[in-house]
Image (cartoon, rainbow, N blue to C red):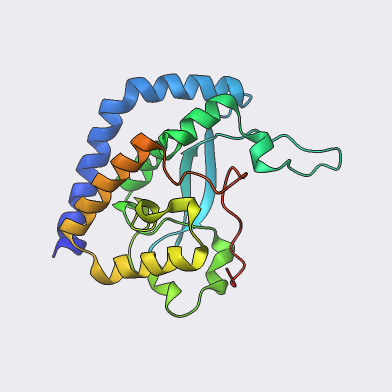
Amino acid sequence: MYKNFFKPGMDFIMAFAGLLVLSPVLLVILILLAFANNGKPFFFQNRPGKNGNIFKIIKFKTMTDAKDRNGCLLPDAERLTSVGKFVRKTSIDEVPQLLNVIKGEMSFVGPRPLLPQYLPLYNSRQKKRHLVKPGITGWAQVNGRNAISWRQKFEYDVWYVENLSFFLDLKILWKTVRKVVISEGINTANMATTEPFNGNN
């Protein structure tokens, strides 16, 4: 009952209210990122949602499109802007995903939506992470985020799917707020993002 009825309704109400309350702050961040990223404050990317259905995720753009002399993108850490560092540290870059929640593509809590190219790399257990909507935050995010291995992340994701409940979601939301405040587990050592998943991590 909670997963199929109450959770979607709560997601919509919370996301709509969140956008209204945060709109002044988001407007300032949008303007700053527009200046830092040549008029491109948002980042759009295809991600697999529930049952592997592809949708376009919306985030604030924290990195430039700077390339080397061969036309290849520079490493993530070199493209991360000053305002982008702040936005990522405070997890404000995730806030535009409230629009994905309102559209019914995401939930507040669930396994994080990863890249489409990872889909064929999952084993049968790891594929269970797609039995529910992806989330802005999740059990893996409050238990290490980018500081833990892919294997451990997927174990946390599947455990969440198998134990989904209202009280578990409340616990995850509370722990998320705490981790955002102390900026814990944002990045792996010396990297702006975690390493890509290759099926063996």
Q: Nearer the viewer, residue 64 or 51?
A: 64
Q: Nearer the viewer, residue 138 or 117?
A: 138
Q: Position of residue 73 (x, y in %)?
A: 73, 42
Residue 62 seen in this snapshot: yes
Q: Position of residue 186 (x, y in %)?
A: 47, 44
Pick out the residue farthest to the right: 69
Q: What residue do we see at 32% from left, 64% from top? A: 132
Q: Position of residue 145 (x, y in %)?
A: 44, 52
Q: What residue do we see at 70% from left, 43% from top? A: 75
Q: What residue do we see at 20% from left, 51% from top? A: 170
Q: Nearer the viewer, residue 149 or 130?
A: 149
Q: Quadrant of residue 82?
A: top right
83 is higher (above) or lower (below) than 122 = above
Horizontally, is 126 left or right of 74 in the view? left
Q: What residue do we see at 50% from left, 78% from top? A: 123
Quarter of the image where the C terminus is located: bottom right
113 is higher (above) or lower (below) than 178 = below
Horizontally, is 74 left or right of 142 in the view? right
Q: Nearer the viewer, residue 63 or 195?
A: 195
175 is higher (above) or lower (below) than 117 = above
Q: Position of residue 11 (x, y in %)?
A: 24, 48
Residue 51 seen in this snapshot: no
